[in-house]
Image: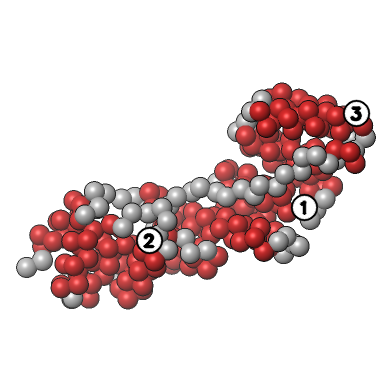
Amino acid sequence: MTRNSLLLSVLIFLSISIFGIAQEMKPEAGKLYNEGNALLKEGNVNEAINKYDAALQIEKDYRIYYQKGVALKKADKLADSKVAFEECLKLNSGFEGALNALGGVYFSMGNYIAAIDNFEKVLSSNASSSVKTKVKKNISLAYAKLGNESLSGGDANKGIEYLKKSVENDNYDAAYLSLAKVYSETGKYDEAIAAAQNALKYRSKITKGGPYYYMGMAYKFKGDTTKAKENFKLASADPTYKKTADYELSLIK
């Protein structure tokens, strides 16, 4: 298993709809805006972008820039999407939808520090508690990415620091699994067991084999062969970990 495979990088984007408020715009801009929204909803992304561009020629409205950014993101035009969300925020700096969306663009670009910066601005806004809960999941994902990048680069301490921040923001099962792995590799066996137990407790995407395997490794190094064997047997039931778990079992007398 590679460290990257321990992470499930599915970002949560807020469903912030601003359809149906074009009456506050200039009539022609509002008409084009609504047409763009309808096209975007139908999946006609490029045509929607053209409508938003035409609307912006008439009126520079933050909602048009936001919807344009959403459309550009759907078209995988990340740099252009970033610009659109930045223009949106110049006009409405506290709009949590654009802050979260800009964070999502940075995340997709691999700039996790900038992503976290924008996500955290949502937490400082007047957004609802449900919105902030979703954004904290995004922050957790970004910190988990940073943690695994650090581990891959050989910096275990920095990796652990980031992964701990990940689980502080959300009980992310894959981040707990990464912590269990690095703790077991760096001699922090009690911490590895606790992290693996949390990975099982909050498991939503990962399989059960990983936590059991790293608990087995921790117990093995602690000299508790009985508990090591119990956990390796449980890990062996998972096809992903069967080979390595069976190997460890073969070493136990």
In this rendering, position of residue 236 left or right of residue 92:
left
Q: Quadrant of residue 185?
A: bottom left
Measure the C-alpha gap from mark 2 to mark 3. Answer: 54 Å
Q: Position of residue 18 (x, y in %)?
A: 76, 43
Q: Which of the image's four quarters has the C terminus?
A: bottom left
Which tag, 2 or 3, sits closer to the chain's start? 3
Q: Amino acid at mark 3?
A: Glu
Instruction: Rate crowding at label 2 as few (under 14), some (14 to 19) or many (20 or more) other CA atoms within 10 Å.
Output: many
Distance (Cα) linking label 2 and label 1: 35 Å
Residue beneath label 2, please? 177
Q: Is residue 225 above or below residue 159?
A: below
Q: Residue at x 71, y 38 (%)?
A: 69
Residue wearing tag 3: 28
Which badge, 3 or 1, is on the more N-terminal residue?
3
Residue extending furthest toward the front: 20
Count of numbered circles on the image: 3
Q: Say if mark 2 contacts mark 3, CB within 8 Å.
A: no
Q: Position of residue 155 (x, y in %)?
A: 42, 61
Residue under numbered circle 1: 95
Figure quadrant of residue 88: top right
Q: Earlier in the sequence, mark 2 or mark 1?
A: 1
